[in-house]
Amino acid sequence: MNKTLIQLFAVALLSAFISVFMYRQVEGPRRVFWNDSDNGDVRYAGLVDKLFSARSTSAFFSAAPTNFTTAAEVSTPAVVNIRALIESDGGIWERATLTGSSGSGVIMSPDGFIVTNHHVVENSEEIKVTLADKRVYKAEVVGSDPSTDIALLRIAEDDLPFMVFGNSDSVRVGEWVLAVGNPFNLESTVTAGIVSAKGRNINILGGATSIESFIQTDAAVNPGNSGGALVNTFGELIGINTAIITESGSYEGYSFAVPSNLVQKVLRDLREFGEVHRAFLGVNIEDLDSEMAREIGLPNADGVRVTRVNTNGAAADAGMQPGDVILSLNKAPVRRTPELQEHVGRFRPGDRIAVEYWRHGIRRRTDILLKDKNNSTSSILRASGTELSQALGIELRELSREEKNRMRIKGAMIASVRKGSVVYETNMAPGFIVTSVNGNRVSSMAEVIECIRGAYNHVVLDGYYEGEPDLYSYRFRKGVGK
């Protein structure tokens, strides 16, 4: 009896081993795969997957690997150390002394334009920039904007490594990012984290016209990182690191960056005009809450409610009313006040934007011609020379502060000449800098336009082309041309 039981047990055990062995030969080892299809689910792969082997998959045995080395290699050469020297008043009995503050900056073009924070270079007497390869330069301030805490510098050098802008609108919460800068004067420091939130307002800039729509991350940012780069894993610039929330004075888990799309607009203005040309809707606004949304029939609380419409403002001209809820600008959803301020902040007076809003249970649309804080579009009309474009075929723009300093000249630049126009027949080329009209010296676009408008018939424009010492003179008659 015992012998029979032992034989049966042995046969059963052998059968089990054979079954497991045969199953393993067919099934194969289990591995976790990351599916590159749209649903991105994580699952087990086995025999079924072999039937669909054409689907692109990448195997791994734990969490998805993330490689930051390429982004670090691309970004670190373009991030610089900035030291701003500030003269402090020593009082009656003491001599004035120079104190220094340090920060970071990002090279944005090979010819030496560098972006940093306004607060890094504010009130500075002298600015020194140290590149990643240890070269040191003196920098000049091209322009600075306290309302966004962005400043543009320039150093006299060419063929510099520079960073490419990424699209901050496409950044997603949870996405990996790198902070590159010089905290505590530690050169070329790279830290990693994720995007914790977008459109964050922390009330740090102050001022009625300030724009705070920060990208919040948990990448370590400390004193000295201000003005440095926030980059995605492709090495593209998606923000300028600006602030931290801390009680100790050092990093405590929350850092904030100005979005790159807003930075680009500010830099274009500073480079072209030496100042920022801000556009306004001409409304007072507040965030929408769930109770308000329910009362007016909206499915959720995404939107910005208009509480006041300024007389003669852009929104008033378009017929908007208090109580309207702005839902999108140029088809981009607007969920909170900071998002709306950031989107409008990317435009200049004279630009048009498409606004979608909610009124009396109906989704409506309108186009709004943006204005400046004085309810005028004239700054852009002067900058583009619209009046002269129609009459003479030319467009004017102001000289930037950097151009004035570099060429030691005052006036206005001819931005374009329309083919077949009266000025085109004189062989004037774009880039000509008008310094006098009919013998009257001019130092701005407004003066050029005023002098041409006041001329009876004949107009003589004198001026220079950059890099050429000779004075050029162009003569034509108003109102003559094709």
Image (spheres, helix red, strand yellow):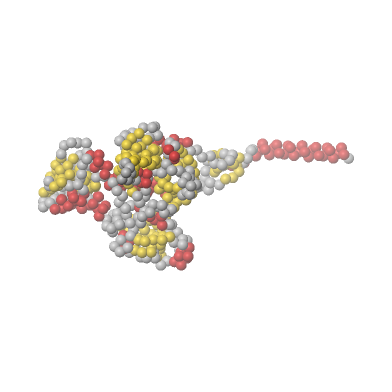
Q: Is residue 95 left or right of residue 440?
A: right
- Of all residues, the one furthest to the right in this rendering is 1
Q: Is residue 78 above or below residue 337?
A: above
The percent position of residue 108, horizontal first and vertical second, equals 35, 40
Q: Which residue appears at 27% of the width and 56% of the height? A: 377
Answer whether residue 293 is visible to the viewer in this image: yes
For this rendering, which residue is in front, 335 or 46?
335
Figure disc tally: 0
112 vs 325: above or below: above
The foreground one among 236 and 240 is 240
Residue sitting nearer the eye, 103 or 50? 103
Out of 122 and 401, give the one closest to the viewer: 122
Residue at image point 39% right, 65% down: 323
Please state the horizontal and vertical placement of residue 236, each as a whole percent of the image: 42, 41
Measuring 45% from the left and 48% from the top, which residue is drawn there?
244
| Image x and y of residue 86, in percent | 34, 42
Say if 340 sits above or below 86 in the image: below
Is residue 424 visible in the rendered image? The answer is no
For the point 72% across and 39% down, the residue is 19
- Residue lying at the far front in this picture: please name it: 93
The image quarter containing residue 306 is: bottom left
Dividing the image into 4 quarters, which one contains the N terminus?
top right
Picture coordinates of residue 121 (x, y %)? 35, 43
Answer with left or right where residue 9 lies relative to residue 325.
right
